[in-house]
Amino acid sequence: MRDSQKTAVHHRAVSAEDGETRLDRWFKRHFPEIPFGRLQKMLRKGEIRVDGGRAKADMRLSPGQKVRIPPYEEQKRAENVPVEKKTPISPEMRALLDSCRLYQDADVLVLNKPAGLAVQGGTNMTQHLDMLVAALVAEEAEKPRLAHRLDKETSGVLVFGLNAAATAHLTEAFRGKTTQKLYWALAVGVPKGRAQEGLVDLPLAKRPGWGGEKMEVDYERGKDAQSRWQCLAQAEGLAGEDLSWLALSPLTGRTHQLRVHCASLGLPILGDGKYGGAAAYLKDRRLARQLHLHARSLTFPHPKGGRLTVTATLPAHMETAFDLFQFQIPQAEPVSWA
């Protein structure tokens, strides 16, 4: 996308994952190299538009809307403002990112995102994948662009586009729900009754007020959210506490959707104090107080044709829990085509 940014106006569709995001925060996620002052000036002059209309910084975006991106790098040169280059990273971080690489070709980069590493920047955020991942491509190459997102605490499959056409294709695939997502979670408790699988259909909305981003079930303000779940195994902990291994498939892409839906089932994800409170922890001190939620596999249409499935191994803290509860992990090919 870099060449088009330098020479011409272009447009980007808002993905499902970016729904409800403020316009200024959307720019910070996808174009962190644009200074806030420059963004405000472009908005005042009407250079940035949403679906052809003028927009303000606090405008909430909806999936499918088209955002007009002016040739900002060219403008910065005209004003003698230095164009930001790729951020240098430490050898240790580069080695970590290399070890996370699951698949790469000319169009697509897929990582096994480490738990605890943010995908995009935010308040007091000094390191995030959207910035660091540029180190994995050649200096003259376009900056990789996120096709979707994962929570900071969630590990697993994360996809980037390596050029403008590929990114647009991948973004549309996620927005159009032509991808298949499989998550694994360890949840405290066991399903009620004899149910071993089901569908959660509960609308979600951001909780008003301060205190950080948090979602809640809201039948008046909420947007549709559906998640399929299946209990793959159950076990009992040292203190007689039950634990369930769940397979989860989000049919929509709301913020924290799986975490809220699991809590609504009375099965808070292990380590998810945000939505499960004290009930999200077991007494066994061998278990990490981290979120036990992992994007296990993702199937998506490749920009050049065919469907690609990529599978990510568990992070260390979840491997420990699986060993403790003697859950048997099935063998899976890291990458397969269909």
Image (cartoon, rainbow, N blue to C red):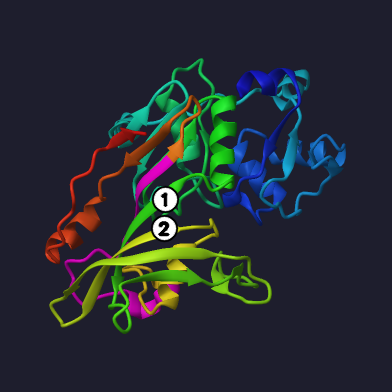
Gap between marks 2 and 1, in whole Å? 6 Å
Residue 41: image quadrant is top right
The residue under label 1 is which amino acid type? Answer: Lys
Q: Badge 1 local density, few (<14 within 10 Å), some, or many (20+)?
A: some
Q: Badge 2 local density, few (<14 within 10 Å), some, or many (20+)?
A: some
Q: Is residue 293 visible?
A: no
Using residue 83 as the reference point, say whether residue 239 is left or right of it.
left
Q: Do the residues bearing badges 2 and 1 touch, measured as CB atoms within 8 Å? A: yes
Q: Position of residue 227 (x, y in %)?
A: 46, 64
Q: Position of residue 3 (x, y in %)?
A: 64, 18
Q: Residue furthest top?
A: 140
Residue 328 position (above or below residue 176): below
Total tally of numbered discs in the picture? 2
Disc 2 secondary structure class: strand
Q: Position of residue 296 (x, y in %)?
A: 32, 50
Which span of residues is magenta-colored? 274-299
| Residue 81 part of the magenta-drawn span | no
Residue 108: image quadrant is top left
Q: Position of residue 194 (x, y in %)?
A: 29, 81
Instruction: Name which of mark 2 and mark 1 comes first in the sequence.
Output: 1
The residue under label 2 is which amino acid type? Answer: Ser
Label annotation for residue 249: 2
Residue 114 position (above or below residue 31): below
Image quarter (top left, top right, bottom left or bottom right) of the N terminus: top right
Residue 15: image quadrant is top right
| Residue 278 part of the magenta-drawn span | yes
Disc 1 secondary structure class: strand
Using residue 134 as the reference point, say whether residue 318 is left or right of it.
left
Image quarter (top left, top right, bottom left or bottom right) of the C terminus: top left
What residue does disc 1 label?
181
Tell me which residue sits at (22%, 78%) in the image. 242
